[in-house]
Image (tube, rainbow, N blue to C red):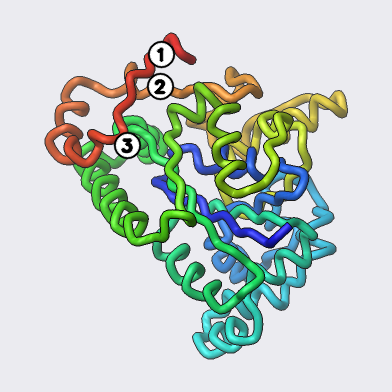
């Protein structure tokens, strides 16, 4: 199988971690988490290797024993010269293919500012084909999640932030070759996961494996990323070992505790924004970002979940 790297692009809180975990559950796949954030973690003064894994509770077989942290530090060095020399010598993901022994790597980084230069860099690597999956979600749901996480913010600020981010992603996505890009709607992934993942696998030219949907039953060694979603995997692992499950720090913060405690392991549609946003907030979003959001509105209802 040819080597493939899948970059998941999308606004935060749009389901990128869920999609990445499912794809990373393929027998020939490996989910890396948000690679873009590795530099920040590696440059912490007292950083240890095991802290790079958001799933392992303690020593991590992958990040502690297989990954060469010295190599990673060169790629994420604060020195432009060091980074440039590392990139000229060998592509970063080429190392990850060696460390994982996978054929398909999944980077959950989401950001155009990271994905664009990686795509350019990979043009020089003949044996690796890059792909971009653009996952979108109704902007009202995304801004609601942001307001829940950052209560000191407001809908006006979040709506403008979301609109500008989406407009940038739309421009980048339009410029990509047709065979290297695919759009996935979060709402459709959450309600028709089997159909959507089959389509993604067909696009990637890899066999669809139904057990991918049971992502929590597979081994994962996620780098930086969504701690809440990762908590579901830890929950399953602890249930398997007959230990008590606690969803609190460091995996999920207190604001999300109730949601993740109630949430089952199966893939479910999250439409909390329909109950949590006020009419005034919805009107503000419509005024500032409604036109940009129009293509992402679906007819799913709360009963669907």
Q: In the picture, residue 231 is in which quadrant?
A: top right
Which residue is denoted by mark 3 in the rendering? 143
Mark 2 vs mark 1, CA separation in Å? 6 Å
Q: Residue furthest left?
A: 287
**In the depicted view, which residue is nearer to us: 297 or 18?**
297
User: Against 295, is 62 above or below?
Assistant: below
Q: Number of marks in the image?
A: 3
- Give the left or right position of residue 167, taking residue 83 as reference: left
Badge 1, how many Cα within 10 Å: few under 14, some, many 20+?
few
Q: Nearer the viewer, mark 1 or mark 3?
A: 1
Which residue is denoted by mark 2 in the rendering? 271
Mark 2 vs mark 3, CA separation in Å? 12 Å
User: Against 100, is 73 above or below?
Assistant: below
Q: Report whether residue 40 is seen.
A: yes
- Residue drawn 30% across and 40% down? 152
Q: Report whether residue 258 is seen.
A: no
Q: Residue furthest right?
A: 241
User: Against 294, is 80 above or below?
Assistant: below
Which residue is denoted by mark 1 in the rendering? 302
- Give the left or right position of residue 209, taking residue 295 as reference: right
Q: In the picture, residue 154 is in which quadrant?
A: top left
- Residue drawn 76% across and 72% down? 68
Q: Nearer the viewer, mark 2 or mark 3?
A: 2
N-terminal label among 1 and 3: 3
- Mark 1 element type: helix
**In the depicted view, which residue is nearer to us: 303 or 209?**
209
**In the depicted view, which residue is nearer to us: 13 or 130?**
130
State if disc 1 and disc 2 touch (CB < 8 Å). Answer: yes
């Amino acid at each position: 199988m040819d080597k493939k790297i899948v970059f998941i692009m999308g606004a935060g809180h749009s389901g990128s971690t869920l999609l990445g975990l499912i794809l990373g559950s393929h027998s020939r796949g490996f989910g890396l988490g948000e690679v873009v954030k590795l530099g920040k973690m590696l440059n912490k003064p007292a950083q240890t290797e095991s802290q790079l894994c958001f799933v392992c509770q303690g020593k991590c077989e992958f990040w502690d024993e297989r990954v060469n942290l010295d190599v990673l530090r060169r790629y994420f060095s604060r020195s432009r010269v060091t980074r440039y020399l590392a990139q000229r010598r060998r592509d970063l993901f080429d190392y990850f293919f060696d460390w994982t022994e996978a054929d398909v790597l999944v980077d959950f980084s989401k950001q155009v500012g990271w994905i664009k230069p990686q795509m350019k860099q990979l043009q020089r690597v003949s044996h690796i084909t890059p792909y971009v999956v653009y996952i979108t979600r109704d902007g009202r749901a995304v801004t609601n999640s942001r307001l829940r996480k950052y209560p000191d913010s407001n809908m006006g600020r979040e709506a403008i932030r979301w609109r500008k981010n989406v407009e940038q992603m739309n421009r980048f996505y339009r410029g990509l070759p047709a065979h290297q890009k695919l759009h996935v709607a979060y709402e459709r992934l959450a309600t028709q996961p089997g159909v959507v993942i089959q389509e993604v696998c067909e696009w990637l030219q890899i066999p669809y494996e139904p057990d991918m949907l049971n992502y929590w039953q597979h081994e994962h060694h996620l780098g930086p990323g969504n701690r809440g979603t990762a908590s579901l995997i830890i929950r399953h692992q602890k249930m398997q070992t007959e230990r008590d499950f606690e969803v609190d720090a460091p995996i999920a913060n207190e604001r999300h505790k109730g949601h993740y405690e109630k949430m089952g392991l199966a893939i479910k549609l999250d439409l909390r924004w329909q109950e949590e946003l006020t009419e005034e907030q919805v009107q503000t979003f419509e005024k500032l970002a409604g036109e940009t959001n129009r293509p992402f509105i679906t007819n799913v209802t709360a009963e669907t979940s």
